[in-house]
Amino acid sequence: MHPMMMLHIVILAATFTAAQCFQLNMTQFYEMPPLYDLDDYDRCLQELSGQRSTYCFVRAEVQPDESVAAWRAIAEISQYDRHHFDHRQLYFGLCLRECEASLAGLNKSELEALEAGLLSDNAKVNVYLDLFSMEANNRQRHQRLTNACLNWRLQRRGFGVLAKSVVEYCDEAGHQVEDDAWNLTFYGILGTLLVLACLGSLVDLHLKRGRHDKMLKERDHYKTPPKSTAQQVLLTFSVARNWYRLNQEPSGKIGRELRFLDCFKFFAMFMVIFAHTNWVIYESAISNPQDPERLLHTAAGTLLVSGSLITVTFFVISGLLLTINWLAVSRSLSSKRDTFSFGQYALLFVKFNIFRYIRLTVPYAFVLLMSGVYFENAGGPLWRHIFEREQLACRRNWWTNLLYINNFVRTDERCLLQGWYLAADTHSFVLSLVLLMLGHRFARWSKQLYAGILGLFVVLPGVLTYAMNYYPIFVPTPQTQKDSFIGDRQFTEFYTSSIMNFGCYFCGVLAALVYDQLALKQYKLRESKGFQFLWFSLIPVGILWLFSAHPIFQHYYVHPSAIWGALYAGLQRNIWGFGLAAFIVGMASKVGWIFRKFCCLPIFRILGRLTYGAFIVHLLVARIVLATVREPIYFGTGMMFAFIFFTVTVSYLCSFLLAIFLELPVSSFLKLMR
Ligand SMILES: *[C@@H]1O[C@H](CO)[C@@H](O)[C@H](O)[C@H]1NC(C)=O
Ligand SMILES: *[C@@H]1O[C@H](CO)[C@@H](O)[C@H](O)[C@H]1NC(C)=O
């Protein structure tokens, strides 16, 4: 291992120096037309001068012209497509009144020279056009004017290129929001939840008053279950009771030993929100695109790209928890008899799936419903592009999310894009449960079975990468993020596919099995010096592993060789998952010194429990904040962190409300059903 690591470090050092050599020629950069040109939205719609004023959001694509410096710059800079935006794609926010004024002095032949035609062959733009199909009328009416207008601007500013364009949508002053069936459903459900919460809380208060037991402290009242079933059902909605449930100490030995997972969940979620807020900033408008582009050429850029490994954390934890549950249930049943019949397995399988489905889906469905609600908003040129796109996609494709097939069905019109994780997790859950049952039924062969499955799902991603010619890592390029991952084959087939991620989930399953065996044999992992060393060395090795994508990502001109690429694709996530599994088993056996103490702090108990809610709601929050931008925003560290902290805070607050009013009632209701 030692010489291997040395070699790795040498390679890394060499590639760092190579990457730092990349210089963006800024003279050339400013020869290109800016990516965003947005007229003053509020002035356009508020300054009414007789006729109706209209503001159109237009997508344009610069047409090739080798004789012009601007085109040569675009071609040169956009060829680094993993690091740079596609500078052919321009956004225009045009106030039609101003367009008419600027074109008024031109005669017919001059106007014709400015028309470059309709942009119709850009598949990603067409997805938007299809979603905004109600704008077909505006699109036709304003096509010629907007195209001539934006080309006039490109000419006047001396870029010399022409662009084809298409209107995405137009806004007019005095737009009113009408409540339709979708909105009314949402308000109805919201009202019902509030009424139930009030009712539950009042009943709870009444019961507490009626209890003349001086010995009982206030909090004890909220922790004791009521007697009648009707009361029990009503009290699931009691706010005070749910607050105590949220705060509850983990019960049992396993619960206490795995307490640190809450901290893992919180920090992993922080990273996910970090990455996603960045993405939504890319989706809106940036005044200095050169800075994120330059950042991606550095080691920090590599970290951003391989940061997608964070998602693996959730797969591992999820596999672990499923297996622990399964072991507990199967043990308590088999203490009564030795073997299960096929019917018993089937019953358990259905039960596990139904309980999980209800627990996850009820809050998820509520957020889906919320994502489709039209409401009064501050608008802005990009509002509909960023936010209404989501509303329309959710109204069209909510069912793919509820069936958990959204990571392979209708992937161009994703509603709640982060939902791919839940789909992949569900598929992994079902498959793992089947495997655990097989392992239980054929206990003699279980070791071979598990080893075989792990091997298969490490090899499979590699083979698929080789056969389908995928890139060895998933690179969320600036342009991909700006296009909201539409039409990105690598994202859909490589990154979010369940097959590609199952290996990591299964590492979690194995971790739980190992942990269980250790507990049964009362083996003290903590007393093994070798394991201690291994555990602590996982931390630096993990950081190095993040950088292992550096040579591939920063390799500018040559495609990495197919065999090595496939090998890396098979290993990147799985080794991370495997290491994490070992890390978790270690920590559960009380290895970890102050890291473990820190992770067990009580604050993470609440934050960890709010993670799921924050996960399903955070993109909505980020979108609401960023969709109101009027002008391109400056992309800098301060600005970025301001947005990120805001999104994190609001997501956790929303998640808190969601937990108190919906998630916890549902989970305690399910407990009653058991
Ligand atoms: C930068 O680009 C400009 C314009 O294309 C060119 O004249 C200049 O030589 C370039 N500078 C370098 C250092 O390549
Ligand atoms: C339009 O205007 C341009 C410049 O002002 C002139 O050269 C051209 O002849 C005019 N064309 C017509 C058809 O009037």
Image (cartoon, grey):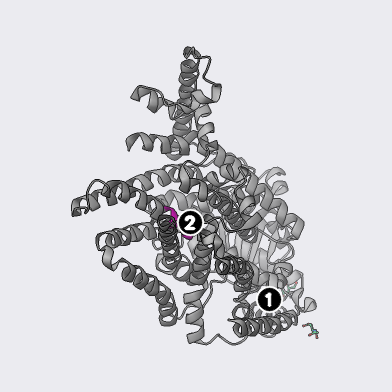
Q: Nearer the viewer, residue 373 or 244?
A: 244
| Range drawn in magenta | 316-321
Question: 394 left or right of 168?
Answer: left
Mark 1 neighbour class, 10 Å CA radius: few under 14, some 14 to 19, many 20 or more? many
Residue 344 in picture, x, y percent from top left: 22, 50
Our reading of the magenta stretch's main secondary structure is: helix
Answer whether residue 530 is magenta in the image: no
The residue carrying mark 2 is 317
What's under tag 1, amino acid-wise?
Answer: Val
Vertical relation: 196 (above or below) 60: above
Q: Secondary structure at mark 1?
A: loop
Answer whether residue 318 is magenta in the image: yes
Question: 628 left or right of 405?
Answer: right
Vertical relation: 174 (above or below) 122: above
Task: Give the CA separation, mark 1 to mark 2.
Answer: 53 Å
Question: 152 left or right of 386?
Answer: right
Residue 89 in picture, x, y percent from top left: 62, 69
On the question of residue 242 being in view, the answer is: yes
Q: Secondary structure at mark 2?
A: helix
Front tag of 1 and 2: 2
Residue 588 in picture, x, y percent from top left: 52, 55
Q: Nearer the viewer, residue 228 or 154?
A: 228
What's under tag 2, amino acid-wise?
Answer: Ile
Mark 2 neighbour class, 10 Å CA radius: few under 14, some 14 to 19, many 20 or more? many
Q: Nearer the viewer, residue 665 or 587?
A: 587
> Along the polypeptide, which appears first: circle 1 or circle 2?
1
Give the label on residue 161, or none: 1
Residue 556 in picture, x, y percent from top left: 63, 83
At x 51%, y 25%, the residue is 220
The quarter holding residue 108 reads: bottom right
At x 46%, y 62%, the residue is 412
